Each structure stands twice: as structure tokens, then as C-alpha cells.
Amino acid sequence: MNILLVHQYALPPSSAGGTRHFALARRLVRMGHAVTVVASRYSYSGTQTVSDVDEEMLDGVRFIWLDSGQRGRSIPERALNMVGFGRAVARKMRALESLGETWDIIVTSSPAPFAALAATIEAKRRKLPLVLEIRDLWPLSARDLAGWSDWHPGWLLLRQVEKYLYRSADQIVTLLPGSEGWISASGGDPRRMTLIPNGVDAELAPEPAAMPRGDLFTFIFAGAHGVANGLDTLIRAAKIAAGKPGGERIRLRLLGDGPKKAELIRLAQEMDVTNVVFDDPVPKSQVQAELARADACILHLKRVPTFAHGVSPNKLFDYLLAARPTLFCVNSPNDPVTAAEAGLGVPPEDPDALAGAMLNLAERPVEELEEMGRRGRAFVMAEHEWDGLAERFAEVLEAAVAGRREVEA
């Protein structure tokens, strides 16, 4: 198959952020397919340019970088940039068509609704099968985080776009266990849904490093510093833990960037928090080395209704792959950390509970922490390795193509 994949924030491993689509695409290429990825040259965080060229081949995957979609700091700015990227996608697809390029199938991904809309419209115009991937339940998450009412014009508009995308898709891939009900109620056909979560790259993963065993006990959060992450809870928890017996050992590293980083730095300064360090993001290829320097990891998301439909954050699987105990602070129906006995579940947005969990881990014997880490790594290697996930993804693409042929026959 000749596959066109449209996702505003697709990234190569040389960038900081999620590299899901590169991982899937290069395995599809190995299976004999051709893959072209159309993405923005600007990263999700808005702090870096992913590529300075317009087009390049990366491990057999063709990337086309559009000079559109630079992330804004406010919701209106982000919305305008998403619209701009969607228009750029439509122009690029038509330009490629004028040069004689054709595809067998188009894949598009949330949470950039207007890019997905442009790809859907172009798929309909060309009578091509469409696979819609749901990485985030937009606009539900935007409504919850922005505090929109049910009658907010942004919600009403985006909700109609969302329903149109679900109805138009030949196949739907969701990363979120528990999201099927919302998608079905919004027009998606449950018979055409497949769960394919995020994963890890076993062939690139180093052997897990030994625990640091130092005087300090370091927790790390590695990822976006956005509204959804609620990282103020981590700063408050670090402050609380420092005042408890044994808390002088606790250190917290916040590795990454995002729209809330400057605000978080100010909060730490105002609270006189001295056991928190803010570090710049690193490329995906360096994440495991950074995680190896920590004793444990933290995943935290705000308590909003959206996450009750399930989560599949890249950083969680990176944590488990690094064989580090993890504190899972999310109100989600799926909790891989507890399921794998690889750490502790903690209520989100509860600094006291998080501080207690941090002290709990720091007081445990190193051997027990290492065993947690081994269980987590074994779990993620068995359930979330990209080779197996890519095979399932290829099956979805083939089903979409076959289904379209049946309709046209």
C-alpha cells in the first residue's frame, strides 16, 4: 500500500516528544508499504523547529514538513494555528496530486481536528479509504480543561467536526481503553474500532541501568508542561515531602517544556521550594538515559472527566521500559502501573497523597524497587512493543482498503 499519514505533531526520534507515527511508519515500510508523513515543522511545545528542510527520508519514511501550525500560548492562538495547518494540509495534498502522486489510503490523527478534517475531505474527494486515529478525545479534553459550558461556541463547532470525522472514517483506531462508548455515541461504528495503544521500541531500548543508590532519592517527570499535566501538584508535593521525616532525601526533576513551564518556575520560587529542578527537554533518543538517573518516575494528569475514558501517554511506557518504579496519578479506568505491580496508584491533584507516596517509595529497600522496575519492564515489553502494535495497525489499514473495495464492487 501507498499510505499517506497526516498528523500535525508527528516527530522523528531526534526531537523531544512522542514518536508514535515514526515507530509505526518505519515498521510499515519494512512490511513492504510506502509511507509519507505530512506534519508541521514546529513541535507540539512550540519551542523548537523539528526540521529546516521541506522534505526528507528518515529510515525509509518520507516526511513532508509544512511551514504552518506553530503552537500558540493561548487556546484561541492554538485554534487559529490548527486551522492554518489544516488549510496547509489541503493545499499540499492538492499540490502533490497535481504532480501525479496517488495513495491507497489516508490516515489522520487527533488532537488536531482541522488537519483531520482536511485529510477527511480530501479522502472523500479522491474516494480513498480513511483511518481516523484518536489519541485524545478532542474537543472533550479542551472543553474540560478550558472550563467551557455545553453552549460555548468553540465546543459546539468542534463537536460537529468530531462527529463528522467519526461518521466519515472507514476504520477508527483509538489509543484509549474506555473511549469506545464516547466514540460510538458520537457517530463512530463500534464494529470498526480497534484499540492500539502507545508502545516502546525494544530494538532501540538499552538494558535498564542499575538504581542510583545515592544519598538522594530522585523522582522524575519527563514530558509536556501543559494544562492537562497539573504539575503544580508535583511542586506542592515536593514541598510537603521535604518537611517530613526522611524528606530531606527527596528531589524532583521536571524534564520538558510547555506553556505552563514559566508559571511553574514562578510557583516554585514563590513557595521557596528548593528540592525541585527544572530541566530542558531532550530528544526521544536520549530519554532512557535521563530516566536512568532517577530512582522513580511520576505520571500526573489533572482530575477531569476526559481521562475517565482512558489514557495512553508515551511517557508512561518510557518509564516502565526504564525499569523504574512509577507513581500513577490519573483518574483513569486503566492503570498499567498497578496492573503490573510496578509502582503505586495515587489520586491526582492531591499533593498530600503524592508526598506520602514519594516518601513511601523512598523508604523501601532498593531490592524491592528494582523488582517493581523489572515487573514494569516485563509488562511493557510483552504488551506494548511496537512490532506487535504495527502488525495490528497494518491489519486495520488492510481492512479499510478491503472494506472500501467491497462497497465499490
Image (cartoon, rainbow, N blue to C red):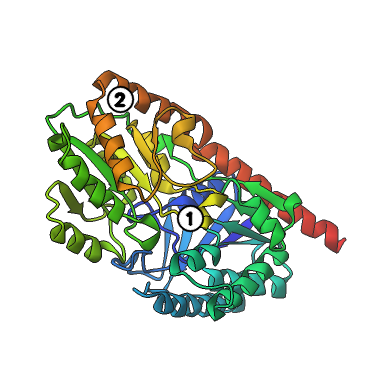
Residue 18: % across, % down: 41, 53
Q: How busy is the neighbourhood of tag 1: few (under 14 within 10 Å), some, or many (20 plus)?
A: many
Amino acid under disc 2: Leu
Tell me the residue that label 1 is attached to. Answer: 61
Determine whether the residue tagged by mark 2 lies in a helix, strand or loop.
Answer: helix
| Quadrant of the image containing the N terminus | bottom right
How many numbered tags mark residues here?
2
Q: Residue at x 39, y 55 (%)?
A: 12
- Left-right relation of 60 to 398: left
The residue closer to the viewer here, 344 or 170, is: 344
Looking at the image, tell me whether mark 2 or mark 1 is earlier in sequence order.
Answer: 1
- Left-right relation of 247 to 123: left
Seen in the picture, residue 132 relative to 247 is either above or below; the reply is below
Determine whether the residue tagged by mark 1 lies in a helix, strand or loop.
Answer: strand
- Left-right relation of 374 to 107: left
Q: Residue at x 42, y 47 (%)?
A: 314
The residue closer to the viewer here, 6 or 192, is: 192
Q: Which dot marks residue 369?
A: 2
Amino acid under disc 1: Val
Front position among marks 2 and 1: 2
Seen in the picture, residue 244 relative to 395 is either above or below; the reply is above
Residue 106: % across, % down: 63, 63
Residue 110: % across, % down: 54, 62
Q: Quadrant of residue 289?
A: top left
Q: How busy is the neighbourhood of tag 2: few (under 14 within 10 Å), some, or many (20 plus)?
A: many
Q: Residue at x 15, y 32 (%)?
A: 245
Q: Are marks 2 and 1 in contact (CB under 8 Å)?
A: no
| Quadrant of the image containing the C terminus | bottom right
Q: CA distance from mark 2 to mark 1?
A: 39 Å
